[in-house]
Amino acid sequence: MKKLLRKALNKQKPPETGGRITNETVAEHRERVLAGGRKFKYPLQYTKHRVLILTILIVFITTLSFFGFCGWQLYGSQSTDKFIYSLTQFVPVPVAKIDGAWVRYSDYLLELRSAIHYLNTKEAVNFNSDDGKRQLDYQKRLAINKATQNTYVDKLAKENHIEVSQKEVDDFVGLQISTNRLGVNENVYKQVIRDYYDWSFDEYKNSIRQQLLRKKVMARLDTEGRQKIDSILQQLAQSSDFAAVAKEQSEDVATKAQGGEMGVVNKNTEDPNGIISVASKLEPGKVSDVIEGVDGFYIVKLIEKIEGGDIKMAKIYVSYKALNQKIAALKEQGKIEEFIPIQQISQPTNQ
């Protein structure tokens, strides 16, 4: 009976798994424990690997979709909203190419958005109307032409070591503020810039820098125009008949027939070429030296100073031609490319 009971108890006792751990059996026990844990380790490694692949795939698809959406907004629908404009300021995507130089999309949108803002808020142009759509196409053409020309001016400036300093920009802006017809201070002037052109003050200053750089480049490169204006100045030194020389030599259609006379000029008239400022400092009957304006060379004569600061003056004008000639030649040679379709259209009339 006792033998049967002992035998039954031995059957119920679990078998020993390794016995007592000794120096001789420690390696065997370690391997047994590690083998038991591998069934939990490898599934976890597989899960992490799968999560990593899925994460990379999601990021890739999201990035591809984002750039695809932005590409369509830029080159397909030609969006002008603020988000797309901000994106082009950080990502230098091109809108055109001229003589190997890339034209930044942000430069194009800067000009176009400003024109759209002004026409919409100040002229009440309805861009959904037929005339409004033609107006928009016309503004697109103006904007891409200006952005392309500015890029080419930058290229020519670097090649000819021509620069515009920050002081020149600040001095010009300061003069604009001090002589503006509104009689406002700098803070109000900044608000006017924002209200009319939807530009920050930095964007406005950059536009001024580009304007001054363009003037310097055109004046330097236009050797034929320089020779003509210098010749006119020599003629004036030998003759006191400013009106006769102006009728014969001036390229200003509006004043040529009147011997260059501009009539009474208000002292607060906008003066981007600086000719009113120069004329105001002359004595009546005196003629200035050559003035390098924004759009050409000028020589001015002060006729009379009027009480209150207004003046009577005359001018002789010779336009800059070299830049337009260079750009026309590049176009004929196929060295100007545009990456968005824009129609060539004459200026429409508002309805």
Image (cartoon, helix red, strand yellow):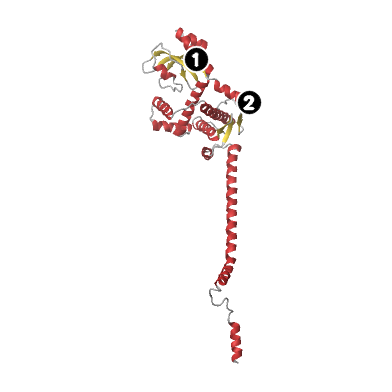
Q: Is 178 on the left-hand or right-hand side of 323? A: left
Where does the image place residue 255, in percent across and percent down from the top left? Answer: 49, 14
Where does the image place residue 300, in percent across and percent down from the top left? Answer: 45, 15
* Image quarter of the C terminus: top right
User: Which numbered disc flags the more N-terminal residue, 2 or 1?
Assistant: 1
Where does the image place residue 180, in percent across and percent down from the top left? Answer: 41, 25
Q: Quadrant of residue 179?
A: top left
> How far is mark 2 from mark 1, CA to CA?
31 Å
Q: Is residue 308 above or below residue 243?
A: below
What amino acid is found at the position of numbered circle 1 in the picture? Ile
Label 2: how many Cα within 10 Å (few below 14, some 14–19, many 20+): few
Res. 133 visible in picture: no
Q: Is 134 on the left-hand or right-hand side of 242? A: right
* Image quarter of the N terminus: bottom right
Residue closest to the eye, 97 or 79? 97
Residue found at the very far bottom of the displayed protein: 1
Residue closest to the eye, 24 or 112? 24
Q: Is residue 196 above or below residue 236?
A: below
Residue found at the very far left of the displayed protein: 307
Q: Which residue is mark 2?
A: 333
What amino acid is found at the position of numbered circle 2 in the picture? Gln
Res. 329 visible in picture: yes
Circle 2 sits in a helix, a strand or a loop, which is it?
loop
Q: Residue at x 58, y 32 (%)?
A: 96
Q: Residue at x 57, y 49 (%)?
A: 59
Q: Which residue is mark 1?
A: 229
Label 1: how many Cα within 10 Å (few below 14, some 14–19, many 20+): many
Where does the image place residue 273, in percent across and percent down from the top left? Answer: 46, 21
Q: Quadrant of residue 140?
A: top right
